[in-house]
Amino acid sequence: MKKIALIVLSLILFYSCEEEGKSKRVVSASSGNINSLSVVIDNDLWEGEIGESIRNTIGAPLYGLPQDEPQFSLKQMPTVVFTDFATKNRTILKVVKGKDADTKFFENAYAKPQKMAVVYGQTNQEIIDQINTNAAKIISAFKTEEIKEKQRRIRKSLNKNNNIEDVLGLTIQFPSAYRVAKEDGKFFWLRRDIKTGTINLMLYEMPLDAISKGDETINDIIKIRDSIGQAHIPGPLDGSYMITEDAYTPFIGSSILDNKPTYVTRSVWEVKKAFMSGPFINYAIEDKINNRYIIAEGFVFAPSVEKRDYVFELESIIKSLKIK
């Protein structure tokens, strides 16, 4: 009997350890540049109508930049080479032909952190339909993953400025490479120098009735930012200052930031009376408890270079904002 009991105990321990091993599956760390998307698709599909569909949706230009830049840098690889190190990219879009039409999302399938979207279809048209139908969801999943990664990198070296918290009653995580270029009452202008210019972030508050809801929302936001530009962001010439460029139609959308309704505006700024311009992204966060809007706006001045990743850095910083 003792021998039988010992065997049973051994079997229990063996399967318990096996189940524990399964639940604690170890995967290696993911890798890749921010906004670099691996597209796993065979060459003939990539060069045809499916590849064109991916480039026109997932790889479409990001709105609000002076020149066309894709929201993700697409790096295609055939299925046969999708092994070993090639599976470790943080974001992966995979196309599988020959299975029932569907789109599925997988978390940490080959590395951690990692987000993978797999698009299935029996025919080219089924795959294209899946891509077009689920493009917004796919983009959102990848962008969320990249925001988290960028914020993780930012947290490695944070600026410890406490005046923002004391004056505006909010916290925001931004790199130590940023300096306070201007602090005027409840207005803060943060700035990081780069080789070709500067990356900038403005933080300030406005009364809750300063932005109306409905058709006039975008006009109110533009009026506010233009008045702030005139008051606080001077240009290189006497009487010059930052305004919103008239020739570029602003995009406005709704979002949630710190569990609060938020207007998000993207467009292009310029300097009145001077040849300077660049992209901006403006978050107007509704803070009903304090009867105000918190405005967090990032803008980039970087002539002759790509600006997507600079705007993305500013967006990642803004999305760390929390109102006390």
Image (cartoon, rainbow, N blue to C red):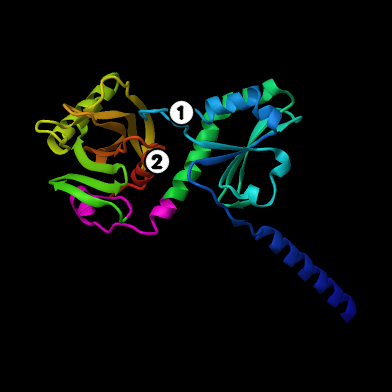
Residue named by callout 2: 312
The relative height of residue 78 versus residue 250 in the rendered view (above or below) is below
Question: Disc 1 versus disc 2: distance between alpha carbons?
Answer: 14 Å
Q: Is residue 150 left or right of residue 100?
A: left
Q: Position of residue 53 (x, y in %)?
A: 59, 24
Residue named by callout 1: 61
Range of magenta residues: 151-175
The quarter of the picture where residue 273 lies is top left
Identified by mark 2, the residue type is Phe
Q: Is residue 182 magenta-colored?
A: no
Asked if marks 1 and 2 touch (Cβ < 8 Å), the reply is: no
Q: Is residue 294 visible?
A: yes
Q: Residue furthest bottom?
A: 2
The residue positioned 65% from the left and 60% from the top of the image is 24
Identified by mark 1, the residue type is Pro
Q: Position of residue 272 (x, y in %)?
A: 17, 27
The relative height of residue 280 versus residue 3 in the rendered view (above or below) is above
Q: Position of residue 233 (x, y in %)?
A: 17, 37
The residue positioned 9% from the left and 33% from the top of the image is 238
